[in-house]
Image (cartoon, rainbow, N blue to C red):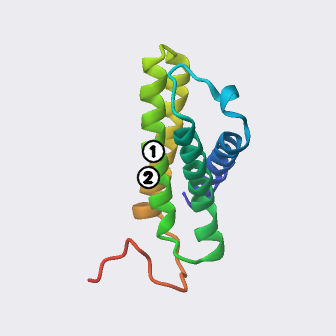
Amino acid sequence: MNVALWIVQGLLAALFLFAGGAKLVLPLDQMAGPVALPGWFLRFLGVAEVLGGLGLILPGLLRIRPGLTPLAAAGLVIIMIGATVVTLVGDMAAVALMNVVVALLAAFVAYGRWRLVPHSGSSRPSVLRSAS
């Protein structure tokens, strides 16, 4: 299960680093979608996607605050739910379906790293560990 989670984390990280990076470097007029979103919001989404992509990989690799990985994945699920709604409003069902698949993969990582196979060996306490 750990290998499957790492593979999905790597693929999602690549996807979100690319998509978020594109939102940060492309001119705003080239990012027109089915629903008009403000430029500042698109840039914010770009930052959130890049940070989420990094949050999927770096805590586990560096063994620093590995409890942030499921939080990053959960944040990306929220972003993808929003993307699904926007594409459905724009009458783009095929793109909405892709967004749902990405959201489900991110939910798999969130649950997998939170409950099934949490990262171990942290040099610092996890955010998600209880005090019990």
Q: Position of residue 84 (x, y in %)?
A: 46, 29
Q: Are marks 2 and 1 in contact (CB under 8 Å)?
A: yes
Q: Residues within 10 Å of mark 1 (few under 14, many from 20)?
A: many
Q: Position of residue 22 (x, y in %)?
A: 70, 40
* Pick the front one: 38 or 24: 38
Picture layout, residue 125 above or below residue 43: below
Picture layout, residue 126 above or below residue 8: below
Q: Which mark is residue 74?
A: 2
Q: Which mark is residue 77?
A: 1
Amino acid, disc 2? Ala
In this picture, residue 107 sits left or right of residue 2? left
| Residue name at image x 59 percent, y 44 percent | 43
Q: Which mark is residue 64?
A: none
Query: Which quadrant: the C terminus?
Result: bottom left
| Residue name at image x 50 percent, y 57 percent | 72
Secondary structure state at the residue bearing disc 2: helix
